[in-house]
Image (spheres, coloured by chain):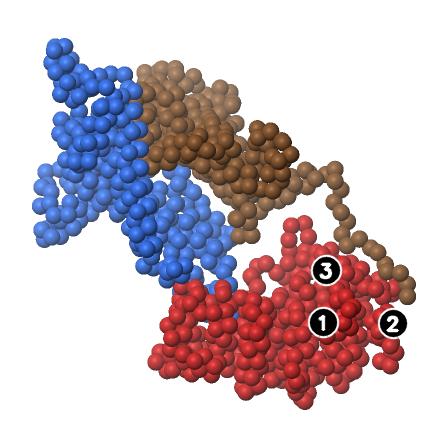
Amino acid sequence: MIMQTHAHNVLPGDAAVLSIDNLSIEFPAYKSTVKALNGVSLHVNPGEIVAVIGESGSGKSVTAMLSLRLLPERAYQVKSGSLSILGRDMLTAREKDLLKVRGRDAAMIFQEPMTALNPTRRIGRQMLDVIIHHQQLSKADARTKAIALLRDMHIADPEQVMNSYPFELSGGMRQRVMIALAFSCDPQLLIADEPTTALDVTVQRQVLLLLREKARERGTAILLITHDMALVSQFCDRVYVMYTGAVVEQGVTAQVMADPRHPYTQGLLSGLPEQVEPGQDLITIPGQVPNLSALPEGCTFRDRCAFAMPKCLQRPPMQIIDASADRKSACWLSEVSPDAPSPVQESRS
Amino acid sequence: MAFLNMLRKRLGGLLLVVFGVSLITFSISHLIPGDPARLIAGDRATDAIVENIRHQLGLDLPLYQQYGRYMLDLLHGDLGTSIRTHRPVLEDLQAFFPATLELALAALTLSILVGVPLGVLSAVYHNRFIDQVARTLAVTGISTPAFWLGLGLIVLFYGHLNWLPGSGRLDEGLEPPPMVTGFYLIDTLIAGDTALFFNAAQHLILPAITLGFVNLGVVARQIRSAMLDQLGEDYIRTARAYGLSKWAVVLRHALPNALIPSVTVLGLTLGDLLYGAVLTETVFAWPGMGAYVVKSIQSLDFPAVMGFAILVSFIYVLLNMAIDLLYRLIDPRIGEVN
Amino acid sequence: MSPPITAPVAAPLPKASRWQDKLAYLTHQVRRSPLTMAGLLITLMVLLVMVFAPWLASHDPNALNLAQRLAAPSAGHWFGTDEVGRDLFSRVLYGSRQSVGVCLFVAFASCFAGGLLGCMSGIIGGRFDGLIMRLMDIMLSVPSLVLIMALAAALGPSLFNAMLAITLVRIPFYVRLARGQALSIRQMGYVKAAETFGAGRWHMVSWHVARNAMPPLLVQLSLDIGSAILMASALGFIGLGAQQPTAEWGAMVATGRNYILDQWWYSTFPGVAILITATGFNLLGDGVRDLLDPRQQGK
């Protein structure tokens, strides 16, 4: 796979399609509070493909869901920060305004194409629902548009797919339908929450290629939520690494892959087969993600970190590594100058 | 194939039910102290007459032969003769069945009209005030003694307000419409007698509310739980993520899918209503099977009770089959396995 | 490089207080559900009335006072009096002993008998199991209200026979539940292992099966109490249950029916008592189901 990094500005600007700033939210639970997001900041510029990577519990999916305010409204509390799409504040927006954003300005693709479509409604009706809702089209025009969209997704027989129920289609086909639906109203932003996790490896690739091709054609930005580092390296311009509800490292994908600064990122990368010499064991990160309702003070990764030191009892701020590329890392070790050997290489020698 | 299998299973079930019901009622009727022959003959009859009747009824035969005879008659559609009315049980039941069915259908309609919206509201506002109110109403429905509710309605709407009649299917002195379906609401319209139609409708209101209120709770709970299942599904999230409004999501996506599993439950409540009408009919002097069977039980008229039980069980099985068929029609996924 | 700092992620719960924690969690759950709370309070109230009826009643429930017959509710007779001048308030209070007592007996007796039979059926298996289950299928195929009425009529009208009839008819539900549990538990690895190591079948039953079959049986039990009281009062109403002069709510409503248009209070108060009691038990039953049925969790 050839890296396709776009040579455009990576810095946050007024034109950002998605911008999240210092966002913290909590889920009240029995006798405790689950701190799901703890000061997340990220942005997606027009046309960019940006990845958010992390283990389960890192807050990546919550971030995606919250972006369109899809979490159950009464279940969470916003503690600080802001979130806006195309300059519209999503956290304070009224339901009426949200309905215009969802699907039109920003669309979403989900993990399970099996269950993400209504099982008892034909594909065609489900597509028409969305198209007619956002665009002033007659039913016949909407139908023509839906068929065109499906054909554009390299679906050979759109009419037949339109007349099918979801269970009559394969997983890959369903995900193509989802992508067609996502592009149906030409959104500026597409949030894809683990879009290929449930698919076969070969289908995964086809679907991702399709997604990128169409996004580049239309200039749509993608926020890709994933736990798969290989996928990030192949498809994304920039990456945010999340851990326990906060971004711990960010930057242009190539830079992060070549020179990871946070021990957690290093751990994720060392899990990639191509990073390991033949004959060596695949390295996995020891220990478990800490309980989000009882996060330790300071750096939340320190119990799993081989380089933990007394200073880690304080929470490390995002350290700027390369301001022009918006490259940052939240580890005290990032202070070490870029020329010094990185901790992973040191420990392996 | 699946359909044939279903049919075979249901028919097997039907045989089991008929066998079971007859066996149970037969055993019960022969456990009781008291002598049906004596009952029929009356107090003044001589022993010889009683003996004669006993012989006629086959009561002098061994029990298994009596049961065999009963089953043989049953196969010919003969449910025996009522001790109380001295008429064939099947004729009695046929005469009373339409009234009961009309009442049960009216009650079912009412309970669905109110119960479905109630269940939907309950699920949409899960654990909030509206949900608590709706659930309280549903539990109250399930917990209300139908006979008492009926009396209350009679006191209020007949006794005090005098808005609605309190008993029967028509005012006294009015001739029933010519029998076509046996449903007065339909037969009066066929006869073109609107005055009689409104009279019949007025008589139906209170019994239907009484019977329907109890069922309302069952319907509302079923819809609530099915809706909660559906609202938790991924496709609901998709529909919301694409900008459909809350109520569009609820009514266009969640409700149709919640109704599919509910059809079974709602359909079976019709069976419950048919024999649940027993108490309501007694309170409102509604001339249906329920009131008939209560009188039969009180006078230990077991052929009539057995006939009623077998008929209702039979209807239950038929209803089950009808629901299975309906299910196949409305759920596109049924063919999936084959 | 300094050694990794080890700090506990979360303080482990002290072992000794586990049941206190469970209780606290239970209380928390019940508190969050006002309807369960209401059900619990009503049930407690009804049970208290049942136990303390003699102290709470203002009159002897069976004392006649023909001068005061069919009196309207007043300070002296809160719920009025019946056709022979008995105080209806006192009769409703005493009636709880019949009506609630019956439904508790019915629910517990059918749960116990059905549970035992079902467990045995599941564990013994073979022909015994087949026979029991066919029998239960037959019983379940008959409309229960009809079966109860027929049984009660055949046994002869009395409260005890009504109780017996309802109990018999409710048993199959518990048999099915308990048998299903017993079967699934027998399939579990650890029980099979115990079996190969020679642990006696019955030893196994008494522990694993009983412990695992309990929650679903309890859920069914708690949901059944409310319907049992309705059944019992329905039988009382059509004259197949409690007989005069027993103060039973259903029978009182039935007698009051004769005076319904002029003396509304006669039927009203016993009926309200049935309604409140059944509602209380049903709310509580729903709450118990939500707590014990894992499928309901997260809803």
Q: Amino acid at mark 1?
A: Leu
Mark 1 neighbour density, 10 Å: few (under 14) some (14–19) many (20 or more) = some
Q: Nearer the viewer, residue A197 or A90?
A: A197
Residue at x-position 24% and y-position 26%: B67
The reply to whether label 2 and label 1 mark residues of one chain is yes
x then y, percent, for residue A65: 58, 68
Identify whether C107 is placed above or below A75: above
Label 2 to label 1: alpha-carbon separation: 19 Å
Kind of element beneath mark 2: loop
Residue picked out by circle 3: A289
Kind of element beneath mark 1: loop
Residue picked out by circle 1: A272
Mark 2 neighbour density, 10 Å: few (under 14) some (14–19) many (20 or more) = few
Residue at x-position 65% and y-position 41%: C22
Label 3 to label 2: alpha-carbon separation: 27 Å
Q: Is residue A22 visible?
A: no
Q: Amino acid at mark 3?
A: Val
Chain identity of mark 1: A
Residue picked out by circle 2: A349
Q: Earlier in the sequence, mark 1 or mark 3?
A: 1
Mark 3 neighbour density, 10 Å: few (under 14) some (14–19) many (20 or more) = some
Location of the N terminus of chain A by quadrant is: bottom right
Q: Colour of chain C?
A: brown
Q: Which quarter of the figure has residue B42?
A: top left
Is there a contact, CB below 8 Å, between mark 3 and mark 2? no
Residue at x-position 60% and y-position 29%: C200
Q: Nearer the viewer, residue A179 or C249?
A: A179
Please name which of the two marks, 3 or 2, marks the residue nearer to the observer.
Answer: 2
Q: Earlier in the sequence, mark 3 or mark 2?
A: 3
Residue situated furthest top in the rendering? B47
The chain letter corresponding to blue is: B
x then y, percent, for residue C247: 38, 22
